[in-house]
Image: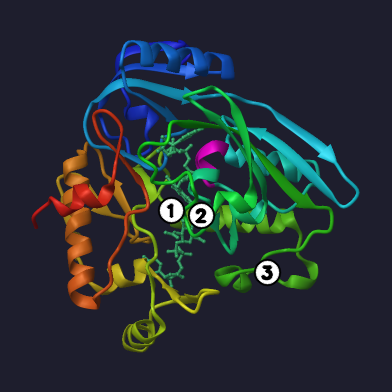
Amino acid sequence: MYNKKYLFNSSLKDLNTFAIDVTAKKIIFIKTIHALIKTVKNCKLFQIPYLILGEGSNVLFLENYKGVVLINRIKGIKITEKNKFWILHVFSGEKWHNLVKYTLNLNIFGLENLALIPGRIGSAAIQNIGAYGLEFKDVCSYVDVLSLKDHKIQRINKNSCKFSYRSSIFKNRYNYDYAIIAVGIKLSKIWNPTIFSVLKNYINLKDTTAHKIFNIICKIRIKKLPNPKKIGNAGSFFKNPIIIKKQADKLISLYNIPYYPQKNGLIKISGGALIQNCKFKNIQIGDAAIHKTQKLILINKKNATSKEVIKLAKIIQTCILKKFNVFLEPEIDFIGPIGKINPLNVLNKIET
Ligand code: FAD
Ligand code: EPU
């Protein structure tokens, strides 16, 4: 469908996994760094806003985008062998899940816990993707960033990326004019499996392999998460809240909430379990609803508008705050008519 290089005043419905039907003035598929720089230069010349997208699996478009959407398809994978590890230099338009499969097929292990996460490599670094006890930061060596002001590429090493739970120096930066071009991933030749949480029920540490973990995780995810090809969603709409121990202890004992102690003494608790405890009983705003088996995920049942999604999110946020005194912070990016908008500013304006 998207064989063309350019699309004018076209719908973004198939280019955001929430399947919100908004348009962009222009959509351009970008395959080279040169094309990216040239397009951004033109946008600046004519004062047209621009937005880089991977797969659109972590965004909510609030309304029609008045600028150019650049779909990043800058591809390439280079593998360097060292004595004790592999270094992968991966361009930002590669699909994350394809990289996981590609490395496994080469008997290079360590990415298997992050199987089936939608999206492209660049965005994986931005929000430090994570699942089943592993995060992008655990395998990242560096991130190559192109300044869209002076067109210089800077290599930012892992420690300077300030990765944390679903965050990094790249996330929620509203005036940072940059594009992630490539990432460096470092994988040890000595495989050390990560068996976290629910995986313990399926895996025997003694005879496990990276392929087994990959297959199990794919099965769990297919069963539990909505497939964006069939039902619009952007994964977890909210982050799991991280709260002080005293408050967590109370909630855990009262409501039997799954929890994960953090290195700094704070406790991450399951936001999905909190929402479940609110018993929203098939709540639906227009076509926006809560996913049955994973309550952190909001879904677009068919033709939901972003207004409906936001209204539902606000109802959930308000209820969780009233009942548990816990604030649910959105995980996804909100995109307004000319660029990213702080989700908290949008949600604060909604009345329930
Ligand atoms: P997009 O949505 O296209 O972009 C995200 C943000 O990054 C946007 O603000 C965009 O402007 C910006 N951006 C994208 N590429 C670049 C670039 N090269 N340079 C500069 N800015 C850029 N996430 C997890 O962490 N763990 C999970 O288990 C998980 N499961 C999911 C399951 C489902 C069913 C879905 C739909 C989503 C899930 N997600 C999960 C969220 C999502 O897959 C990740 O956040 C993913 O990294 C987003 O990639 P993307 O390419 O689609 O990003
Ligand atoms: N749970 C519930 N109800 C729910 C969801 C979860 O009770 O609606 C409880 C269950 O006890 C379940 C446990 O929480 O066993 C853990 O659930 P799950 O494995 O689904 O993990 P999660 O904490 O809800 C996080 C990520 C997911 C990631 C999974 C797997 C966030 C915001 N979400 O969800 O990432 O795939 O862990 O590790 O951290 C995403 O970021 O978009 C995303 C989907």
Instruction: Tell me the CA gap for discs 3 and 1.
Output: 21 Å
Q: Which residue is mark 2?
A: 221
Front residue of this view, candidates 238 and 207: 238
How is the rendered protein coloured?
A: rainbow
The amino acid marked with disc number 3 is Ile
Give percent across and percent down for residue 281. 19, 65
Give percent across and percent down for residue 59. 36, 40
Of callouts 3 and 1, the N-terminal one = 3
Which mark is drawn over residue 225? 1
Instruction: Tell me the CA gap for discs 3 and 2.
Output: 16 Å
Q: Residue at x 48, y 31 (%)?
A: 178
Please state, as top left, top right, bottom left or bottom right, where the N terminus lies in the image: top left
Q: Which region shows up in magenta?
A: 117-124
Ligand 2 contact, mark 3 (Cβ < 8 Å): no
Among the 4 quarters of the image, the one containing residue 323: bottom left
Q: Residue at x 78, y 47 (%)?
A: 108
Residue 74 sits above or below residue 98 on the image: above
Q: Are marks 1 and 2 in contact (CB under 8 Å)?
A: yes
Ligand 1 contact, mark 1 (Cβ < 8 Å): yes
Q: Is residue 279 visible?
A: no
Q: Secondary structure at mark 2?
A: helix
